[in-house]
Every structure is written in C-alpha cells, then in structure tokens.
C-alpha cells in the first residue's frame, strides 16, 4: 500500500486558513523566482563592469545586494508559512506566539502566516528600531 504524503486533512475554517497559506506560499515562490533572475542579471552585469562607468557599477552592486536581501526576506516568509501550517495541524493556528492571545481575523486575512498579534508585532518593531 502506498504511503500517504503528509498533507493534513483540514476542514471548515482550518481549510480556509490552509488555502490562504498555500496561496501566500505560491505568491512568495513566484516572487523569489523573479528576484533570483534579477540577481543573476546583475552578476552578469558585474562581469563586464570593466567597461562601465563607476557610477553604473555601484548602482548595479547595490541593486544586486537589494535583490539578494529581498530573496532572504522572502525565504523567511516561506519559513513562517511552513511554521503556520504546522501550527494549523497542531490546532494552534492564529494564536500569538508571544502573549498567547488570538490574532484578529483581519490580520490573518492580510498575513495568514502572522506569528504575533498586532500589539506584540508593534512592540517587536519598536525594539528592533531602538
Ligand atoms: Zn501578542
């Protein structure tokens, strides 16, 4: 008998959340492909940098760095989505991983992979920018 792949069976509201997460994942993967291609374009441009003006080269370099940074950020989101699916399977989905309060439906609609409620998220951002 063929072993079943680990796609959990979600029903009702959980299925809605699962679909939203899969949609978000597809969107992120699509964006990652674009960034990867752009980053590649930039490295190719670097190789013929000898004939270009300094200003152009530095512009290309900063754009290359930006594309790579974007790629890392999208990768982080992908991890968040995978974690959210795990929480969904564990029945813990939608709970703030900091204060334990339920994250609002509105916030989950925008960021289905949200880890923190708005209050905790804002607090974390303030701490980061200090
Ligand atoms: Zn919270």
Image (cartoon, helix red, strand yellow):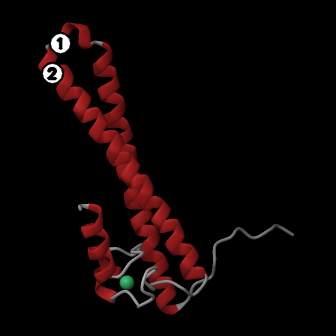
Dot 1 crowding, Cα within 10 Å, few <14, some 14–19, many 20+: few
From the image, tell me which residue sits under label 2.
56
Residue at the image point whose x is 34% and y is 73% from the top: 111
**Towards the viewer: 57 or 19:** 57
- Furthest toward the front, the residue is 130
Q: Quadrant of the C terminus?
A: bottom left
Q: Secondary structure at mark 2?
A: helix
Compared with 34, 5 (above or below) is below
Quadrant of the image occupied by residue 28:
bottom left
Name the spot of residue 34 as percent of width and height, x first.
34, 44
Q: Position of 10 compared to 77: left or right?
A: right
Dot 2 crowding, Cα within 10 Å, few <14, some 14–19, many 20+: few
Name the spot of residue 118 as percent of width and height, x first.
29, 81
Is label 1 in contact with label 2 (beta carbons under 8 Å)? yes
Residue at the image point whose x is 29% and y is 19% from the top: 46
Image quarter for ligand 1 equals bottom left
Compared with 50, 34 (above or below) is below
Q: Quadrant of the N terminus?
A: bottom right
Compared with 60, 115 (above or below) is below
Quadrant of the image occupied by residue 10:
bottom right
Q: Secondary structure at mark 1?
A: loop
Name the spot of residue 114 as percent of width and height, x first.
39, 74
Quadrant of the image occupied by residue 44:
top left
From the image, tell me which residue sits under label 1.
52
| CA–CA distance in space, label 1 to label 2 | 6 Å
Compared with 10, 73 (above or below) is above
Total tally of numbered discs in the picture? 2
**Towards the viewer: 50 or 40:** 50
């Amino acid at each position: 008998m063929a072993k079943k792949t680990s796609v959990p069976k979600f029903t009702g509201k959980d299925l809605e959340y699962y679909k939203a997460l899969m949609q978000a994942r597809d969107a992120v993967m699509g964006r990652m492909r674009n960034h990867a291609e752009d980053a590649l374009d930039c490295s190719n441009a670097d190789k013929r940098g000898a004939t270009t003006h300094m200003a152009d080269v530095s512009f290309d370099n900063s754009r290359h760095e930006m594309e790579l940074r974007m790629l890392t950020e999208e990768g982080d989101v992908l991890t968040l989505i995978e974690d959210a699916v795990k929480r969904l399977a564990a029945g813990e989905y939608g709970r703030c991983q900091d204060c334990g309060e339920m994250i609002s439906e509105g916030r989950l609609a925008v960021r289905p992979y949200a880890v923190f409620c708005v209050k905790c998220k804002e607090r974390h951002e303030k701490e980061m920018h200090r």
